[in-house]
Image (cartoon, rainbow, N blue to C red):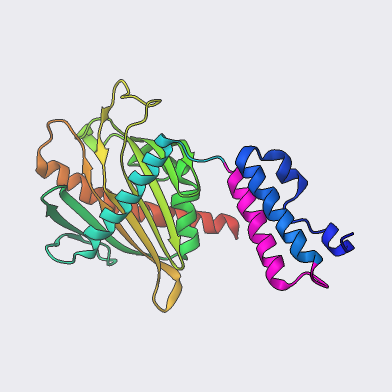
């Protein structure tokens, strides 16, 4: 008979066993029996046995997780590709030209890439900590239309795992209706590593969201935002936004360039105002 210690600590719980089928269940049972056999030959459970038990339980729980479908894996891969390509573009410091510099230090740079076209790079400092900025841009993504006049609506169509979402975004009409109604379907990927956050995205297709009447289906990407605390002052956040958009239609490039660079400047101002109101309400 096993000591009471081992009776209370089976390697695989009966709940797990009931939920497993086929080879997965057989493997879990075999692991459990082997660990119990080893336990019988010892005066008490060694630290390494307890460690294996924990790993075994973790393995069994992972075996029960629902795997991603082929379509979901495709979206995850697209998000990762957008992230890697965006970081590669931003990592190349050559060839950037100044489009706009604002009195507060905000600036927009641009660059023409052979396989992408003209991309824009916004660099600003937001007077709020990283967590507040990240929460507004990621956790409260669907509320962006409440504070950003350039956006009419953002809707999450599907969440895939922890990092990937499919979204539908309707752009608001520009002043004077220079650019007509546009909408976007995008895959977005959010990665957080230590004190740096990267939010990347690119255009995709989604069967449940075909082209909408009254809107021109534009395409964005690769695009991303990089957030990190300002060195020496974690109460402020450095934000870099890479913007790449194909608005489609017959629009002169001079108009497109003017609209996109101004959109980035306006975005930074509206984000600051939004965060300031949020902080004021919470105080």
Is 55 one of the magenta-colored residues? yes
Residue 153, visible in the rendered structure: no
Q: Is residue 248 placed above or below 224 in the rendered structure?
A: above
In the figure, is residue 174 to the left or right of 276? left
- Residue at left offset 35%, top offset 50%: 80
- Residue at left offset 36%, top offset 41%: 187
Residue 81, horizontal then vertical, whole percent: 30, 49
Q: Is residue 160 placed above or below 282 in the rendered structure?
A: above
- Residue at left offset 78%, top offset 65%: 39
Residue 264, horizontal then vertical, whole percent: 27, 52
Image quadrant for the C terminus?
bottom right
Magenta stretch in the rendered image: 41-65
- Residue at left offset 66%, top offset 63%: 52
Front residue (pair 38, 185)? 38
Front residue (pair 63, 23)? 23
The quarter holding residue 253 reads: top left
Residue 248, horizontal then vertical, whole percent: 18, 33
Is 93 one of the magenta-colored residues? no
Image quadrant for the N terminus?
bottom right
């Amino acid at each position: 008979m096993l000591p009471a210690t081992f009776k209370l600590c089976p390697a695989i719980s009966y709940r797990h066993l009931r939920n497993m089928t086929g080879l997965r269940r057989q493997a879990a049972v075999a692991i459990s029996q082997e660990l119990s056999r080893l336990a019988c030959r010892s005066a008490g459970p060694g630290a390494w046995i307890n460690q294996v038990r924990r790993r075994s339980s973790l393995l069994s729980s992972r075996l029960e997780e629902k795997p991603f479908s082929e379509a979901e894996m495709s979206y995850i891969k697209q998000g990762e590709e957008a992230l890697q390509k965006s970081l590669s573009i931003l990592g190349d410091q050559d060839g950037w030209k100044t489009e706009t510099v604002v009195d507060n230090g905000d600036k927009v740079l641009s660059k023409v890439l052979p396989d992408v076209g003209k991309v824009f790079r916004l660099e600003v400092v937001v007077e709020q900590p990283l967590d507040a900025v990240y929460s507004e841009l990621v956790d409260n993504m669907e509320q962006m239309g409440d504070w950003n006049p350039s956006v009419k609506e953002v809707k999450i169509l599907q969440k895939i795992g922890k990092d990937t979402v499919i979204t539908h975004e309707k752009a608001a009409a520009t002043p004077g209706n220079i650019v007509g109604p546009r909408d976007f379907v995008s895959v977005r990927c959010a990665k957080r590593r230590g004190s740096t956050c990267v939010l990347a995205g690119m255009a995709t297709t989604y069967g449940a969201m075909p082209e909408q009447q009254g809107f021109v289906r534009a395409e964005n990407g690769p695009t991303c935002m990089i957030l990190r605390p300002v060195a020496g002052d974690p109460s402020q956040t450095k934000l870099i936004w890479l913007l790449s958009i194909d608005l489609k239609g017959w629009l002169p490039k001079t108009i497109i360039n003017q609209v996109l660079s101004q959109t980035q400047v306006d975005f930074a101002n509206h984000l600051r105002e939004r965060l300031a109101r949020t902080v004021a309400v919470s105080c």
